[in-house]
Image (spheres, helix red, strand yellow):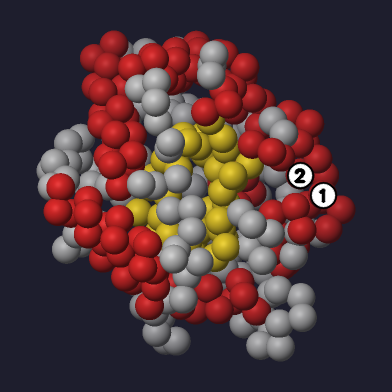
């Protein structure tokens, strides 16, 4: 079975994301280690770390992940922003390690008109420095596919492959496949033949063994728009078919599949619960069936 989960709030303490995930019946969870629109987070106390690790053991949630803050840009040609981004990411990696997380997910960044190759080289150089400064680390960094808005890198599989080729310890990295981003970047995820063609392209360019986690989001914008706008499962431009194909793909049955869908409540109630039920209902042989 795939591991279904959601990105959840750490308001009141990081362990609260775990409690929310448990209440939703999640198999896995994603969180921020601090507010994503701030460079610096408050230092985690030893008691907070103990409480998180204790709650994680009790919840039996698997492969917990964090997403890095939205301000970092390891592709930036501006030296001050680049250094600040690198130092912030190092702090986040150390926080994830203290909490006992499996993955830390990052956007490759934006080249800001310096050119794609220069931006990709900057990201790889940053990761090489991060690895050298933190040589022992259980957390695996995942490069996320992107929609390609503005000068953002990562909207082609070749971008991530290039970063991996330039990093000396590439075995410490993996990839997060965001369905909304991949679709908005122009890759087809349905019907079945097109879905398989996209997965073959990923396998040929990067390798499916590096694909460690999915963000499962529908898209408010059409295929190829290169605009990053998430929608509820089956209620955007993608529809249900890409998700039916994904959750029944045996190659990914033990991969975390994390919702990053809008958080507002709908007529049906908590939309995380609704979206999780939709994904579970798309599993072949599930008597509950898909929800519209």
Residue at position x 57%, y 38% in the image: 175
Q: Position of residue 133 (x, y in %)?
A: 33, 17
Q: Residues within 10 Å of mark 2 (few under 14, many from 20)?
A: some
Q: Is 242 situated above or below 152?
A: below
Residue lying furthest right: 193
Residue at position x 67%, y 66% in the image: 1
SS type, badge 2: helix
Q: Which mark is residue 199?
A: 2
Q: Out of 129 and 290, give the one closest to the viewer.
A: 129
Q: Is residue 176 visible?
A: yes
Q: Out of 149 and 125, give the one closest to the viewer.
A: 125
**Would you identify the image quadrant in which residue 18 lies?**
bottom left
Q: Residues within 10 Å of mark 1 (few under 14, many from 20)?
A: some
Q: Is residue 180 visible?
A: no
**Tag 2–tag 1 contact (CB < 8 Å):** yes
Quote the CA–CA distance across marks 2 and 1: 5 Å
Q: Is residue 10 left or right of residue 231?
A: left
Q: Position of residue 290 (x, y in %)?
A: 66, 80
**Would you identify the image quadrant in which residue 288 lies?**
bottom right
Q: Which mark is residue 196?
A: 1
Q: Out of 102 and 267, give the one closest to the viewer.
A: 102
Residue at position x 64%, y 49% in the image: 183
Q: Out of 288 and 256, give the one closest to the viewer.
A: 256
SS type, badge 1: helix
- Quarter of the image that includes the C terminus: bottom right
Residue at position x 37%, y 62% in the image: 57
Q: Which mark is residue 10?
A: none
Q: Is residue 24 left or right of residue 48?
A: right
Q: Is 124 situated above or below 211?
A: above
Q: Is residue 169 left or right of residue 262?
A: right
């Amino acid at each position: 079975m795939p591991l279904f989960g959601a990105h959840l709030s750490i308001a009141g303490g990081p362990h609260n994301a775990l409690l929310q995930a448990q209440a939703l019946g999640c198999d896995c969870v994603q969180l921020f280690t601090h507010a994503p629109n701030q460079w610096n987070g408050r230092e985690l106390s030893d008691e907070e770390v103990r409480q998180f690790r204790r709650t994680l053991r009790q919840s039996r949630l698997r492969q917990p992940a964090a997403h890095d803050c939205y301000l970092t840009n390891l592709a930036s040609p501006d030296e001050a922003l680049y250094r600040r981004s690198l130092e912030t990411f190092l702090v986040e990696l150390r926080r994830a390690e203290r909490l006992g997380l499996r993955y830390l997910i990052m956007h490759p960044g934006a080249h800001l008109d310096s050119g794609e190759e220069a931006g990709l080289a900057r990201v790889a150089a940053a990761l090489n420095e991060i690895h050298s400064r933190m040589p022992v680390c259980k957390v695996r960094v995942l490069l996320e596919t992107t929609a390609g808005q503005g000068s953002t890198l990562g909207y082609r599989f070749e971008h991530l492959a290039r970063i991996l080729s330039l990093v000396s310890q590439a075995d410490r990295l993996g990839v997060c496949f965001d369905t909304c981003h991949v679709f908005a970047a122009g890759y087809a995820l349905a019907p079945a033949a097109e879905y398989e063609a996209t997965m073959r392209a990923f396998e040929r360019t990067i390798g499916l063994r590096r694909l460690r986690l999915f963000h499962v989001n529908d898209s408010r914008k059409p295929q190829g728009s290169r605009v990053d706008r998430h929608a509820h499962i089956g209620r955007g431009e993608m529809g249900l078919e890409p998700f039916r194909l994904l959750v029944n793909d045996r190659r990914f049955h033990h991969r975390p599949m994390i919702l990053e869908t809008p958080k507002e409540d709908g007529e049906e109630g908590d939309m995380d619960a609704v979206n999780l039920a939709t994904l579970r209902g798309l599993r072949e042989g599930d008597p509950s069936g898909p929800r519209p």
